[in-house]
Image (cartoon, helix red, strand yellow):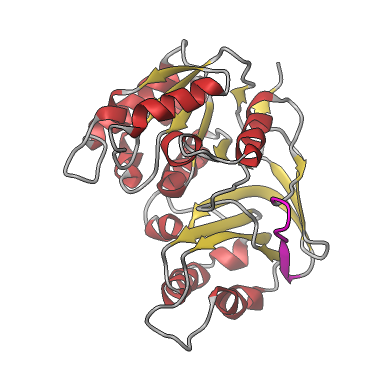
Amino acid sequence: MNRIKGKRLKLGDTIGLTAPSSPAKSEIVPEAIQAVENLGFKVKVGETCYAEYGGYLAGTSELRANEINEMFANPQIDAILCLRGGYGSPQLLQHIDYQNISQHPKLFIGYSDITALHTAILQNSGLATIHGPMAASDLARDCSDYTREFLLRVLTTNEPVGKIYNPEGIAIESLVEGVAEGEIVGGNLALVSALMGTPYELDTKGKLLFLEDVGEEPFKVDRMLTQLALAGKLEDAAGIIFGTFTECESINYSRGFNMIDVFKNIAAPFNKPTIYNVQAGHCDTKMTLPFGVKARLDATNKELIIEESVVCHD
């Protein structure tokens, strides 16, 4: 399927900064703006970046959805970067103008709770999106050169990313050998699970399913993966990519399974090419993954190759 794509960014282009989920602490917002400016871009700051509603939301669902709709429609904004994740993006899905996005495609970047928006935008507007670092969560917190350079590489070049590399000293591991091709889809496991049974349920048929999470014990990851398995999502996938599962050690069961055990128990029986320990997700040093473009997973050789650029050609 041919996806629509946002334009390649150039230095001096304007990035819209929005908070679709939880609010950021007020003191971090100027640092987030400065961090994006330090990358060489101008910043248009959305009202949600300073908003707070009910303690855990960056404004009402209408405010947050309207801001995204307006940023896609605004010709002075070249790309949209999320301030942070947290909770709240599923509330927006019924309010997003997907036709507007199709008509005004732009690069859209975020991860974690932003998974719901990635999925809905990809499946309802056809726009390829970017699972990558966010302004307050990452760029404003002395993020690594690897994180910044990987993001800029994806945003500013027409060339496909090609073979991805973890940060030095961290190996990608193979769970099930084999080769598969398809678009990368998915994101945060809890959000993929939360969308099950809704009109925005993730379509994994023929796709490379990427999953990551944070702060979930193995039995909870088991529960969510089992839900995906029972729904046919693992069987439908061409291959599986497990990112980082940060702070996911067992607390309640000291002799219980670890995360690799869970992957082996739930995912491996489907015999899909599968790798794990890909450094994308809730990790200090993270890669940027394009969603909705062609990729090749060679689990035998522990390789993931992005074969298509996420930006439209100039």
Residue shown at 55%/33% (left/top)?
Answer: 127
Can residue 219 be seen from the camera position used here? yes
In the image, residue 244 lies at what x, y percent? 56, 59
In the image, residue 70 lies at what x, y percent? 36, 20
Can residue 79 be seen from the camera position used here? no
Does the magenta segment cover residue 150?
no
Relative to 152, residue 192 above or below: below
Residue furthest out toward the right: 301
- Apparent side of residue 242 relative to residue 29 in the rendered image (left or right): right
In the image, residue 271 lies at what x, y percent? 70, 73
Relative to 272, residue 290 above or below: above
Q: In which quarter of the image is the C terminus?
A: top right
Residue furthest out toward the front: 142
Residues 224 and 229: in front is: 224
Residue shown at 29%/44% (left/top)?
Answer: 91
Label the magenta part by its dominant secondary structure: loop
Residues 115 and 102: in front is: 115
Residues 148 and 132: in front is: 148
In the image, the segment drawn in magenta is 167-176
